[in-house]
Each structure stands twice: as structure tokens, then as C-alpha cells.
Image (cartoon, rainbow, N blue to C red):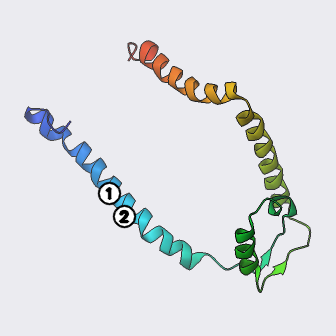
Amino acid sequence: MMVLPGVIGKFLAYIPITVFITLIAILFLALTLNSALYYKLSKKEKTYIPNPKAEQFIPEDEREILAREREGKTEQTEKATRRQRILDGMSDWYEHFLERFVSKSSTRRLSIFLPLLCVIATFIFLAPQI
């Protein structure tokens, strides 16, 4: 768009320039300001929720890091809120779905080739219509 000749080229040249400047600004914000804001606005947790099912697979060096992170915190044993139970149920369902999906090579291949086929189909069937 930037190399088009004539008045149209000058008019359309602002679009890629604007997109480029916007992407650079977003990258700058993502690398600097967002992490600083997260650090300032996030509060330190005073409790932790144990997960013995997941902790049995953690290597020894990561167990030490987890123990240091839990120092000074209390174990949360109270009943989870309704929102947390719903999110946990969704997380368990998604984990089960991914385990079934990834375990078969045919579904892995399908997840790669199906989007490619959709793109090709749109080029073949929709592009002439536009």
C-alpha cells in the first residue's frame, strides 16, 4: 500500500504507517507498563490451596521453591465459593477434553489440517464472491 503510485498511493500510505506505529506502541506497553502495573496492583496472597494430586509430579527442586513460596502463608481449608467450584469444574472438563484430544494422533493431525483446509476453502469459494 505504501508503494502505490499517485494520489491513491499517498492516501493509502497512512494505513500501514498507522498500523506499524500502533503495533510498536502496543509492544512497548506490553513489555514495560503492563508488567509494572501488574506488579503494583496485584496483592500478595496470604493463603494457599494445597493440591496433592498435582504436587506428586513436581520435581524435588520445584518442591523447594513451592515450600519457600508457601512460607508465612496459611493453608486454605474452607469451602470454595460457588464461582470457584464452577471454574474448577470447567477446568477439570477442559483437562479431560485435552487429554483425550492429544492422546490420538488423528485428532492432532485434524487440528492442524482442518484450519488450513478452511483457509483454502475460503480462498476458493468466498474470494470469487467478494
The three-letter code of the residue at mark 2 reads Phe
Residue at 38% across / 13% down in the picture? 128
- In this rendered view, identify the residue nearer to me: 34 or 49: 49
Look at the image and tell me in which quarter the N terminus lies: top left
* Secondary structure of the residue carrying numbered label 2: helix
Q: Is residue 31 left or right of residue 115?
A: left
Residue at 87% across / 65% down in the picture? 80
Q: Which mark is residue 28?
A: 2
Residue at 91% across / 72% down in the picture? 78
- Location of residue 32 by image quarter: bottom left
- Rendering coords of residue 18 (x, y %): 27, 50
- Rendering coords of residue 29 (x, y %): 40, 65
The three-letter code of the residue at mark 1 reads Ile
Density class for disc 2 (Cα within 10 Å; few <14, some 14-19, many ≥20) is: few
- Rendering coords of residue 61 (x, y %): 70, 71
The answer to whether the residue labelled 2 contacts the one labelled 1, judged by CB atoms less than 8 Å apart, is yes
- Location of residue 57 by image quarter: bottom right
- In this rendered view, identify the residue nearer to me: 14 or 120: 120
- Location of residue 76 by image quarter: bottom right
- The residue indicated by pointer 1 is 24
Q: Is residue 77 left or right of residue 10?
A: right
Residue at 33% across / 54% down in the picture? 22
Distance (Cα) linking label 2 and label 1: 6 Å
